[in-house]
Amino acid sequence: MAEEPEVKVVDFDDVALFDINGLRYELSLENSHLIHKVDERLAKIPAEKYDMKVFTINMPYLFEVPGLDKYLDVTLSIDCQPWDYKPDSHYVSTNLGIESARLRDKREDERVEAEKVVVAGDYEKREGLGDSYAIKQNGNWVVYGAYDVIDDDYFAAYRDSVNYKIKDLDDFDKLPDDVPVYVSNFAQNNIVSAREMDEWDLEHVFITKKQVLKDAAALLKKHDLPATPYNQAQIAKEMIKKAGTSHYYEEPAIEYTNREIDEWDYQRLNRVLEYEGLDHIEKKFQGEGESYAEPLTDGRWAVFGTTAADDSLPSGKKTYRLKNMADQLDNLPADAPLFVHPAVFEHQDLVITKPNNADFVTKKLLMDKSKELLMKLDYPETKKNLDMMVKELLSQAGYGRYDAGSYDIEVWSQGITERVRKGNETEKYSQLDGFYKDLRIEKAKNQELTEDSNANNGLMFEGETLNDFIFTAYGKNPAKLRNLDYKQLNKSLERAGLVRLDRKRFTPKFEGIINGQRQLLSEHDVISQALKTIEQNYEADQTKEQVMDYLRNAYGNPPKKRLKLAMKILKNTGNVQLLRKLNVQSQPMIYPKKAKER
């Protein structure tokens, strides 16, 4: 009989991270179904029942592992302590740890908890609506369905079925063709694999981007509309939005099957979509107010201007503005005109020309100006930064606010440069790649802050990111923020009772024995053990409170002094013994159990 693969506990920080046969699996337990259940039971236990003491429970738990016909059998250690140490207090869970983890065979009718194990490492993940999502690994898409995907009140009856629907349609054009966009039929455990689907299922049950575009093209052809990439994308996105949310005979919305859509006439389809912007001529680029641009065969463009293209223009002035240009930009040719200066149409409505000056703001000119802006403001030329600068330039175009600069791209560029350098919108521009010169800060800028479980400074940071902290602590001067010192930032985080970016206090530095077990301890572990020791072994009096306040006060007391006091406390107790300080450059073997502070 083949031996079961070894399950290694790699880390237990934000999530439990396991290594199985070289693949990594993440198991999130924070705010999970399991912990909620544990807390519900603990809430019924009066803290006085156990004399306000902290205790630990070990709990076996089974999880489904994607890609393996096995269960992950995990034994969790959960520390329990009184909520506030008052007479009417109850117990809550605090520290989580992994006692053991192994794979074992499935057994018939065996109950498995509804936690989700996510494959980590070399994989691609797409978020779905509700709790649904899809993961691609080793060339195969596996979709995890949920009951809360279709949440329209009118369609409450459909909530008893499991579905998956892709969440973000804003970047639909950039999605790979094989990405699942809608799945309506699931096997056991609400999981379905593309590899297990036959051809019929892939067309009618497991809908990919490629399939929905194919269906959209067929629908457009049926109604004598050009199947341009733009038209296909618009129809496809509406089909995904409406998928599974109606019944054809009861409500005029799209139920995702080709048969039902094809039974409708064009007028009904257009009414359902509530959209009038489909291209009606293959080569025509539709502008606002019946203006348009059309490429000719000799490299020139025919551009037609109207007074209705911009109602903020003075009476009689004509122009051309491409309709929905931000949505179309990626698919436009480089010489496609986006704006045309009203002066071009002073004496004629139709101009035939090869756009080669600033009177015709083309896609190429817009992209060139965006690159020039990034260089001038000292930001790297990345896809994200280019997209953001393009949007900023377009927003500067002055819709509805006609003046001399409304059609002048140089004026737009100057306006953005001034706003960025003055720090008027630092929060927004901080999302540019390379805002922080130090790559360590840049990488972490949108990560949520983690409070140090040993500290108690009275500050609340729930839901805030590193960026939020930096703006509060250092102001919004972009020149100052972009050159922020990494070491100084770490000190500021620590003084505020937060975990440092470099996690310096969590690096193993000591070897010790806790309750007879040899372990590696970080500075954070030493202080944590000292706090537990004081709480469990010392009588409640003013001295006890003062010592605990000193250890917890990261703002007023230097880390070295807090550590020194913690070591002194542990030295005088029997259950924790510090053996020696490690040479961090040559640490001994790390022991498998690592607890997480909650």
Image (cartoon, helix red, strand yellow):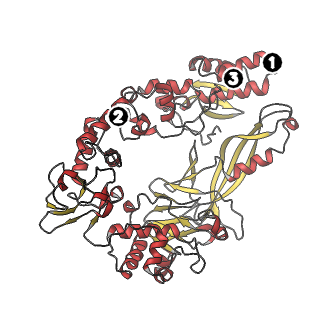
Could you tell me how far apart the alpha carbons at marks 2 and 3 are, in whole angstroms? Answer: 53 Å
Disc 2 to disc 1: CB gap under 8 Å: no
* Residue named by callout 2: 420
Query: Could you say whether the residue bearing mark 2 is in a helix, strand or loop?
Result: helix
Q: Nearer the viewer, residue 238 or 497?
A: 238
Q: In the image, which is nearer the foreground, mark 2 or mark 3?
A: 2
Mark closest to the chain's N terminus, 2 or 3: 2
Q: Residue at x 42, y 65 (%)?
A: 139
Mark closest to the chain's N terminus, 1 or 3: 1
Q: Position of residue 273 (x, y in %)?
A: 47, 69
Q: Which amino acid, mark 2?
A: Val
Q: Which amino acid, mark 3?
A: Leu
Asked if one can make out residue 360 in the rendered structure from this viewpoint, the answer is: no
* Residue named by callout 3: 570
Could you tell me how far apart the alpha carbons at marks 2 and 1 are, in whole angstroms? Answer: 55 Å
* Residue named by callout 1: 541
Residue furthest front as drawn: 315
Q: Quadrant of residue 335?
A: bottom left
